[in-house]
Amino acid sequence: MIDVTDAGRRAATRPPAAGALPRLLPAEPLPTLREHEAYYGAAPQASRTLIAEVERSGLRGRGGAAFPTAVKLAAVARGRRPVVVVNATEGEPASNKDKVLLSHAPHLVLDGALLAAEAVGATEVHVCIERRAGGPNHSLSRAIAERAQTKVAIGLHDAPDRYVGGEESALVNWLNGGDAKPTFTPPRPFERGVGGRPTLVQNAETLAQLALIARYGATWFRGLGTDDDPGTTLLTLSGSVPRPGVCEVPFGYPLTDVLRLGGTSPSEVSAVLVGGYFGTWLSPAAAARVTYDRSSLSSVGASPGCGVVATVASGACGLVELARVTRWLAQQNAGQCGPCVNGLPAIADAVDALYAGDRAGHAQARLARWLDMVQGRGACRHPDGVARFVRSGLNVFASDIERHRRHGPCPSPQPVFPVPPTGGWR
Amino acid sequence: MPVAAAGVPRPPDWRLAMTDRLRLRVVDEHLAVNPITCVGHGLCAELFPEWITLDDWGYPIIDPRPVPPQLREHAKRAIEACPTLALLLRRG
């Protein structure tokens, strides 16, 4: 258990060694404000200089897009009566990091949200979690209750369990009383969001990182990670790994070592999905030569995304995973944009045809055409993500596709990638 | 640029025409579609085939390059004809 004596409190208010881990995931959960402050020290007084410190830290968003946090903060701070939204919806089926973070260090996320609110001049914070996580019974509601005396109002919302519902314009649309569906932009939420006001939408992990930067400074933050991607990141390991779970590693950590944390290695897998269901499949050879950061991952066509590392065991069929998840992603379209509504089911059909055994080669040709055709043509990036997922899958699973072409579908497929049920749009 | 001599009548929309011409010279305009409001009538591709083609499901694919000034009238015609008002010109 965490030491909450005075000695423990004094010791902990000093910044932890810059190179030390963990930063975000204490060994024991810190559900109460008392335990939280004993471990991390009290949150500093927030001020507008925080934005400059965040800029020096090089912090980028951890929800998938890796947008520079300071740029968003500064843009929202320029507007009138801004609002802060904590995006902890984590609709990505293979990701668990925000849920683990909220159960381990809920007050760190709230600190980040309140500090960001002060920095941009907001008096309202909306925390959005996924409905299936428990809504108002969530552990976060107890943590929020402990913050009742702050001058910033904090609301907890259970957002619909929809994959694209976590996209920031969709989340804002839902908070405004509409469906959790993406809207046509511009204006983006930082210009016109909740109640028409400039809205800072940040992923939960991003705000927890911001809370540490506010405490210990940008130089401390840069004590781990790379120059371009400073700090640590939370990763969710899943798929065929023997020890699935969430870990915290510095950016620049070799992907081989990440796999080792999950109890596997490149030689024991046939593919690694990096970034999430909108991410990129890597061959074991590609996985073995990269580190987890934007620059190294981009050399193999991938990006850190939302920190998902999911594997297909060597010997297992990757095509069945590709077909199942592609179908699920196609069903996740919001029913709004023609290219997505029509294109994604057509793409899923073509991947199914590959699975069934595409002897004539029609499905490959159609995929080549349609993956290009849907690119960049939605109100949100959902079709682009699906195209990246499928295109990289076709490369990495080429031998599975060839086997299916010759011998037809697998006799007893055992897919492991999650394809959870989804609810309504409100 | 010759300055109009006093007493010579200017066309009534002189200011509008001038700003329009100046703007075209300095700011690029891109044709864009709101994919949520577009339901694939396809009129735009009929009216402005130089810039708009239809995908396999009848939805417009728009050339991402800036619309050249000499084609701007075609772009405007397509924008005005769209039954769901889904087409727009974006500056910059």
Image: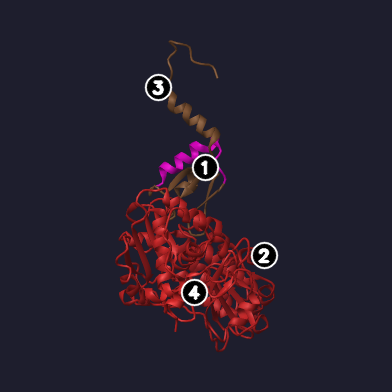
Front of the two marks 2 and 1? 2
Residue in the picture at 50% in, 69% down: A14
Residue placed most toward the observer, A403 or A214: A214
- Give the mark toward the camera: 4 or 2: 4
Magenta range: B65-82
> Do badges 4 and 1 share one subunit?
no
Q: Residue A320 at x, y = what percent?
A: 55, 80
Chain whose colour in the figure is red: A
Q: From the top left corner, tell me how far across and down residue B47 is, in percent.
A: 48, 43
Q: CA distance from mark 2 to mark 3?
A: 59 Å
Amino acid type assigned to the residue bearing label 2 in the image: Ser
Q: Left of A286 or right of it: where is A377?
A: left
State the CA–CA distance, disc 3 to disc 1.
28 Å
The answer to whether A132 appears left or right of A53 in the picture is left
For disc 3, the marked residue is B12
User: Label 4 to label 1, Cα distance in Å?
Assistant: 54 Å
Q: Position of residue A214 (x, y in %)?
A: 48, 62
Which residue is disc 2 drawn over? Answer: A299
> In the image, which is nearer the foreground, mark 3 or mark 4?
4
Q: Is residue A187 visible?
A: no
Hue used for the chain lettered B: brown
The picture quadrant where one finds residue A108 is bottom left
- For mark 1, what is the residue? B92
Identify the main secondary structure in magenta.
Answer: helix
Asked which quadrant contains residue A142, the reply is bottom left
